[in-house]
Amino acid sequence: MPLEPLKNYVGGRWVPSSASSFLDVHNPALGTVIGRTPMSTGRDVDAAVTAAAAAYPAWSETPPAVRARAMFRFKALLDQHADAIARQVTTEHGKTLSESRGSVLRAIECVEVACGAPSMLMGYGLENISSGVDCQVMRQPLGVVAAIAPFNFPAMVPLWFLPFAVVCGNTFVLKPSEQVPLSQQMIFDLLDKCDLPPGVVNLVHGGREVSEAICDHPGIRAVSFVGSTPVAKAVYERGTRAGKRVQALGGAKNFIVVMPDANLDLALPIITESFYGCAGERCLAGSVLLPVGQAHGEVRERLVEAARALKIGDGMQDGVDMGPVISAPHRDRVRGYVEKGVKEGATLL
């Protein structure tokens, strides 16, 4: 029996997308199809923004302590279901179960911090900042805000944004990565139990069309993005052109320098984890290793030895150090980098 397409969460209800095309979601360790992402349209984004805009006036006037209580409920539910969410992350993304559990813990910590909204939202004032003039600062919500999330941390990264937007009195639209939508489906099932008014949080599945609609929609005041650098630049340019506040976090190339006096017994395990943890699919992964002077020979030999010792396989299995990358095209891209290096004169160790 074919899998049913995922639904969007709009106005407090799970609703079918208007999509005419769908993307299979794979377990990258096994190659099996585990879900179908609808390639939603601008019409779906508009429906989510309409619901969020309708919820905004009452939600923005809700006392911060009341808004924080919803996040306390959310955190309690996340704690109860943390392991199930982590297993879903490993199933749809491929990273090891221990890595998934760590990312879910970080996500829960973000919600925990957001529970402190009554303190975080306090303003400040100063009498007689000038003769006869007092200054008062108040922190107020923007309106409808949105986030476009990446594939590499499907549970964690959306919760960098959602809880803070909500406790600050904004209403929220999320587009998770179309490659890994299932963990957010679980998380929104939990949000549905948190007594949030309909429209405060909304979920729209899809690809580029949804991202562009979020950047363009006049009803969205701010956009947060995490992903590749080229797309981060495109989101920033498109969103700011439309008058939005935009924070766009791109990728990185991280250089690790090892000096001749380094304690390699301490450094090498950390370096190995940096390069190979989460299959290298994270912005803080080590990209280039630079041993200085006499450190070069021993560092090279020991890193090759450490890499050969890694157990690669299904992240759900005990003892696996590194799971698969997200997809076959991504695997081929990595292989292409290796082949390009050899063609340009590098020695493959």
Image (cartoon, rainbow, N blue to C red):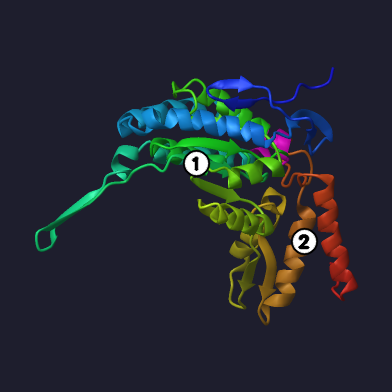
Residue 62 or 344: which is nearer the viewer?
Answer: 62
Q: In which quarter of the image is the N terminus?
A: top right
Distance from the alpha carbon under mark 1 to that under mark 2: 48 Å
Magenta-colored span: 88-97
Q: In which quarter of the image is the C terminus?
A: bottom right
- Residue at the right extreme? 343
Task: Report whether residue 40 is seen.
Answer: yes
The reply to whether the magenta stretch includes residue 96 is yes
| Residue positioned 64% across, 31% down in the render | 44
Q: What residue type is labelled 2?
A: Glu
Q: Is residue 293 left or right of residue 218?
A: right
Q: Which of marks 1 and 2 is nearer the N terminus?
A: 1
Q: Position of residue 246 (x, y in %)?
A: 52, 53
Q: In this view, does 136 lie to the left or right of 215?
A: left
Q: Where is residue 170 in the image (x, y as percent from the top left)?
A: 43, 37
Q: From the viewer's perspective, is residue 242 above or below residue 48?
A: below
CA neighbours of label 2 inside 10 A, class few (<14), some (14 to 19), many (20+): few
Q: In this view, does 268 lie to the left or right of 136?
A: right
Residue 279 or 312: which is nearer the viewer?
Answer: 279
The reply to whether the magenta stretch includes residue 237 is no
The quadrant in which residue 43 appears is: top right
Give residue 305's mark.
Answer: 2
Disc 2 on helix, strand or loop? helix
Q: What residue did someone put label 1 on?
A: 145
Task: Report whether residue 157 is seen.
Answer: no
**Pair 1/2: label in front:** 1
- Residue at the left extreme? 132
| Residue positioned 86% across, 72% down in the render | 347
